[in-house]
Image (tube, rainbow, N blue to C red):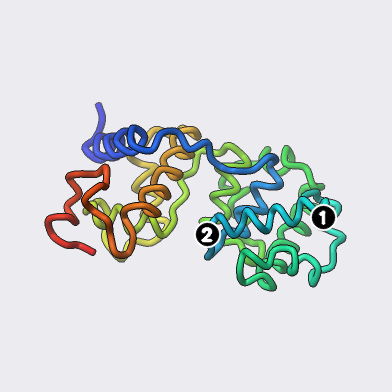
Amino acid sequence: MKSQGQKRLLKIYNRLFKHFGPQSWWPGETQLEICVGAILTQNTAWSNVEKAISNLKKENCMELGRLKEIKIKKLASLIKSSGYFNVKAERLKSFIDYFANHHRGNFKNLFKEKPEDVRHSLLSVKGIGPETADSILLYAGGVPIFVVDTYTKRIFYRLSLIVKTATYDEVQSFFMKNLPRKTNLYNEYHALIVMLGKHYCKPNPVCSPCPLKKCPARKNKKF
């Protein structure tokens, strides 16, 4: 028997899916590209990341050996469009060194470990926080773990399903306790949340055309 939380979350999911359709996330041709994108998308729009990834591909740098060899100054110049490019170049280098040294540059080696151990290991890499680590696990590794971002917190606070002060782990736990542990579901749900946050549930929300017609924020002005 489904809990009230599960019923509500699935109802929201179905409404969003009907409105936006399948999102086919994560945009990336390889597991490595997904990891690179997950790091570059920190604090920036995906359109800026796309430009950076395009630059890396033009220089044949979307390959482990090339990313390991490239000078950090050159790497920073290629990913400039993603913002905070010097910091992100260092973070990419840290991840590449970790991946090459600890897993021999092989994703099978990385994801053969227990998910909680992989996550702990990823979080030990400089510049990789929970959202980035979980994006790598879900989208590159197919691990059923729910990714939480700013959109998630904003939307589900307005829906009165979480408190405003909820931590990353608390929000993630809420979803994972109330949804079936299915990679495809977590993948699609996160993508749909991003679409809702980008187009309607903004800091200054556009409520009228929003597909979530019964959102409590409309009535209570919980913005």
Please tell me the numbered disc located at residue 44. Answer: none
Q: Amino acid at mark 1?
A: Glu
Residue most extreme to the top:
1
Q: Is residue 192 left or right of residue 10?
A: right
Identify the image quadrant of the N terminus: top left
In the picture, residue 218 is in which quadrant? bottom left
Q: What is the three-letter code of the residue carrying label 2?
A: Ala
Instruction: Report if the CB atoms under discs 1 and 2 are less than 8 Å apart.
Output: no
**Residue at image point 62% right, 66% down:** 127
Question: Where residue 162 sits: x, y (%)?
Answer: 27, 55
Task: Please give left or right for residue 134 compared with residue 16 in the image.
Answer: right
Q: Secondary structure at mark 1?
A: loop
User: Would you call the spot at circle 2 few (<14 residues within 10 Å), some (14-19), or many (20 or more)?
Assistant: some
Tell me if mark 1 has few (under 14), some (14-19) or many (20+) residues whose alpha carbon lies within 10 angstroms of its own.
few
Residue at the image position 45 percent from the left and 44 percent from the top: 191
Label located before the other in sequence (1 or 2): 2
Q: Is residue 43 above or below residue 190?
A: below
Q: Which mark is residue 45?
A: 2
From the viewer's perspective, tell me whether residue 157 is left or right of residue 129.
Answer: left
| The C terminus - image quarter | bottom left
In screen coordinates, is 148 left or right of 77? left
In the figure, 204 relative to 32: above or below? below
Pinpoint residue 26: horizontal percent, then vertical percent. 57, 42
Residue 189 vertical position relative to residue 203 in the rendered view, above or below: above
Residue behind mark 1: 59
At x 36%, y 44%, the residue is 175
| SS for dot 2 | loop
